[in-house]
Amino acid sequence: MQLPIGIFGVAIGVVALAQASKDVSANDNALFHRNIEHAMNYGWLLTMPCAVGLWVMARPIVALLFGRGAFTAFDTEAVAKPFSFMHWDCLFTRVSKSRGRFSLPATWQESPW
């Protein structure tokens, strides 16, 4: 789950942050908003399939990783149910990686967080 976010999401964020900083320093707000919107769209394009795949494939993943030895079918079901809710983590992590606001001067920010 963290591999696509770590590789692609962070790469998109780093490139978008550098471009957004250039746009802000050039006082081009329209280009700034357009580039941040494109970065968010690309991020969602990568994150949504990962989240849906994790939600749909939770039971087979748990069965593949732990379905042997003392781990029974009941245990697989018990672990797969909470594991299937980890798809929300993909989505919320994607939202928290939206760092376009860090390229703005401090006077433009509404809050430090």
Image (cartoon, grey):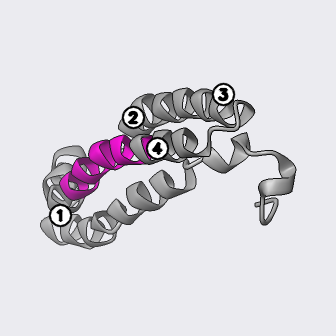
On the question of residue 69 being in view, the answer is no
Give the side of residue 98 with respect to residue 70, left or right: right
Query: Where the N terminus falls, by quadrant?
Result: top left
> What amino acid is labelled 4 in the image?
Arg
**At 16% across and 46% down in the image, what residue appears?**
64
Q: What is the crowding at mark 2: few (fewer than 14 residues within 10 Å), some, or many (at least 20)?
A: few
Label 3 sits on a secondary structure element that is helix
Q: Which mark is residue 72?
A: 1
First in residue order: circle 4 vs circle 3: 3
Give the side of residue 110 with respect to residue 67, left or right: right
Q: What is the crowding at mark 1: few (fewer than 14 residues within 10 Å), some, or many (at least 20)?
A: few
- Residue 111: quadrant of the picture: bottom right
> What amino acid is labelled 3 in the image?
Lys
Q: CA distance from mark 4 to mark 2?
A: 27 Å
Check the image and report above or below for 9 versus 33: above
Query: For mark 4, what is the residue?
Result: 34
Q: Nearer the viewer, mark 4 or mark 2?
A: 4
**At 46% across and 32% down in the image, what residue appears?**
12
**At 61% across and 35% down in the image, what residue appears?**
20
> What amino acid is labelled 1 in the image?
Thr
Give the side of residue 14 with respect to residue 52, left or right: right
Check the image and report above or below for 94 versus 82: above
Magenta residues, as a range? 39-54
Query: For mark 2, what is the residue?
Result: 3
In the rendered image, residue 113, in percent from the top left (x then y), is placed at 76, 61
